[in-house]
Image (cartoon, rainbow, N blue to C red):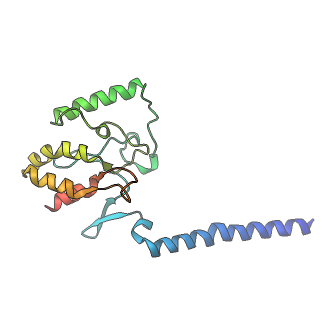
Amino acid sequence: MLNHIRPAITLVVAMTALTGLAYPLAVNGIAQAVMPSGANGSLIERDGTVVGSALIGQTFTSDRYFWPRPSATGPDPYNAAASSGSNLGTTSVKLKERVIADVARLTKTGIVQPVPADAVTASGSGLDPHISPAFARAQIKRVAQARGLETAAVASLVAQQTANPTFGVIGQERVNVLELNLALDAL
């Protein structure tokens, strides 16, 4: 019986060491060498303090800042521990009511209709840090007025912060809200 158990135990220990220790350490080491920022969460620092990640959205509610798209992570917006979609489909009354209320709220702030879709819909994960250039442009007047800036200066900043599709074909044009707001603070 020991002849059967010993190889099984040896195999479990060896595979645990290989797949549970050696492989993750090797992958982490390669990632740290090739792209250390991405391997460490794409953290954004200002004056030595981490202010966020380029990969996870944050809530901005002041008129002085560009607002992100809605988050579907529950009562705490952009809570990575609660990442999930809302699972509300196009026939959902609850989703329809929320979108109508959001459109009305955004229209009151000066965003003209049609309101960009990402202004009133959450991303699949509820954590998307990006908005469309259309939603960013729709907020320029409000942000410029709140900061006492020329709209042309804020529009130029939005244009500078607009990222093209990856490799020119993957994804869409996008604006990272945290990076845009940090650039706005730096003006």
> Viewer-proximal residue, 183 or 60?
183
Q: Quadrant of residue 12?
A: bottom right
* Numbered marks: total: 0
Drawn side of residue 125 relative to residue 153, left or right: right
Residue placed at 38% from the left, 51% from the top?
Answer: 171
What is the x, y in percent for residue 58? 31, 50
Relative to residue 140, is residue 10 depicted above or below? below
Q: Residue at x 31, y 51 (%)?
A: 173
Q: Compared with residue 29, is residue 72 higher up or lower down, i.e. above or below?
A: above
Report the side of 184 relative to 92 (left or right).
left
Counting from the top left corner in percent of width and height, residue 53 is at 35, 59
Query: Which corner quadrant holds the N terminus?
Result: bottom right
Which residue is rendered at x = 28% and y = 39% of the image?
119
> Which residue is at the far right?
1
Quarter of the image where the C terminus is located: bottom left
Q: Farthest front residue?
A: 169
| Percent coordinates x, y for residue 29 in the rendering | 51, 74
Q: Residue at x 19, y 45 (%)?
A: 137
Q: Nearer the viewer, residue 16 or 111?
A: 111
Residue in front for this viewpoint, 134 or 7: 134
Residue 39 on image: x %, y %: 45, 67
